[in-house]
Amino acid sequence: MHRTTTHTTTEDGFDYMANTGQAEKDRDACGMLLAVAIIAALTFFQYLGLY
Amino acid sequence: MTPHDVSAYGRTRKSILSSLYGYGEILPGLLAMLFIGIFANNLPGVPNPFTLENLFAWLDGVVGPLHHTPLFQILNSNFVWNPLLLGLLVGNVFGVPDSWKRGLSLIHMLMPLGIILLAPHFPIGHAFKLGLVPMLLCVAALLGTAGLTLLLARLCKVDDRHGAVIAGGLCTGDPHACAILMPLIKAKGGQVVNAAAGLVVFGLVAMAAMPVLAGWLGLPEQAFGLAAVLGVGNGAQATSAAFAYGYEAGRYAGWFDVGRLVIMPAGFLSVFSVMFVRKLRHQADPDVRATRGIDRFPVWLGVFVVCWLLACLHLFHEPARHAMFVMVKWTFSLAAASLGLSLSWRDVLAPGPRGLAVIAMAGIIRMAAVLAMVAICIKTGLLPQ
């Protein structure tokens, strides 16, 4: 088990600041889809005159 | 078995949602970020008056403005810096319980989310009202500073990740850009905070030096408004330096600051592109660490660029654009709280003073170049006397 810093690493070696591989791509995709959904919703609602 | 474990993740992955932890696992960390966020900033929708932002505003009232600019804005108090400071304080005084860490890992989703939502904030068309010559000077200052800083960082043998975040922050004139570059460059949190702090410190020096140098050159106030925006530091530092030169200069700094703001994405995109291509060319070199682990141009960054282009085509109008910026404040506040909690004071100091030396060298050369460019433009009639 590699402990980098007590601020980021748990007793089990889980480092929450580590972000690599397929898991990183999936997290990026989650953030990206959420952002696109928010931007699209806010823009369309305005164009449809809902606010 | 956790999503952090790549091989195990590959075996258990069903969809992109597999990268997210369960609600029960993230709740403690999410609450920690939330409470740090709402006690750091006046976040829209939260009527909490006991915030660090309000404390700084109250202290600004006590101290009074410095050349028409609040002192704590000069010291970079904003919706990223405040939760970062509070997170650093909480993490270093009380520690970070293990139960928070799954929730704090949401930073990795919040960063692309916040950066994409930031794109509609940069409609470039607004800036061309400033005129072609001032805009060309803005672009030249941005790209020139980025290239110069990367070169100096390399000559001074600064870790390339640290050098890249410094270049991003210095060329855009906004220490936020250091945080935006963090997931792109794969910089360490300590390098980001160290770079941002160095930029704020150098900005204070530039803020004092620029009006004196411009006085020797006898620059007109309008031209100094532009020079301050391009050569000092963050927006508040530039405004304060310009007001120190003269009232008209201060008013013009506010006018020209739009030029710096709308091309900001070009700053961090150019730094990322340079470092990414460099990494592709030097795959085997262990000293090339920036963007290591990023195999191809990130899709989410492409989405950011598309949204920026749509913003330039004026697709996004008020109040939708304002609503998106409110979401940026929320996401960056939570992410900055998580980043602050992840760092010890030692991590922040670990990159050492070389970064500050690079900032000082690049900043001094930039000040001289900006003043020279503006003076030449006035002599040749490209800028008004």
Image (spheres, coloured by chain):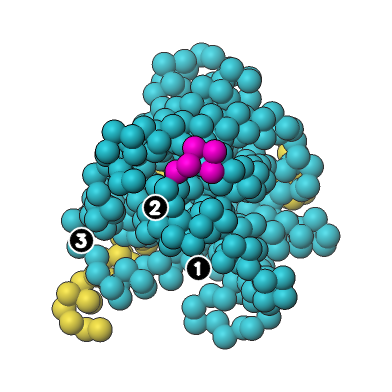
Chain colours: A yellow, B cyan
Asked if marks 3 and 2 touch (Cβ < 8 Å), the reply is no
Q: Earlier in the sequence, mark 3 or mark 1?
A: 3
x, y percent for residue B285: 54, 14
Q: How far apart are the two marked residues, 2 and 1, measured between alpha carbons?
A: 36 Å
Q: Nearer the viewer, residue B29 or B190?
A: B190
Q: Main secondary structure of the magenta part?
A: helix
Write down the residue under mark 1. B330
Q: Secondary structure under badge 3?
A: loop
Q: Is B144 displayed left or right of B87 in the figure? A: left
Q: Nearer the viewer, residue B305 or B383?
A: B383
x, y percent for residue B40: 64, 70
Image mark for residue B314: 3
For the record, the magenta segment spans: B215-219
Q: Do discs 2 and 1 belong to a common subunit? A: yes
Q: How far apart are the two marked residues, 3 and 2, measured between alpha carbons?
A: 29 Å
- Mark 3 or mark 2, whichever is nearer to me: 2
Tell me, yes or no, if residue B106 can be seen here. no
The residue depicted at 54 percent of the width and 38 percent of the height is B216
Specify the amino acid type for callout 3.
His
Question: Badge 2, how many Cα within 10 Å: few under 14, some, many 20+?
Answer: many
Q: Earlier in the sequence, mark 3 or mark 2?
A: 2
In the picture shown, does residue B276 fall above or below B2?
A: above
Specify the amino acid type for callout 1.
Trp
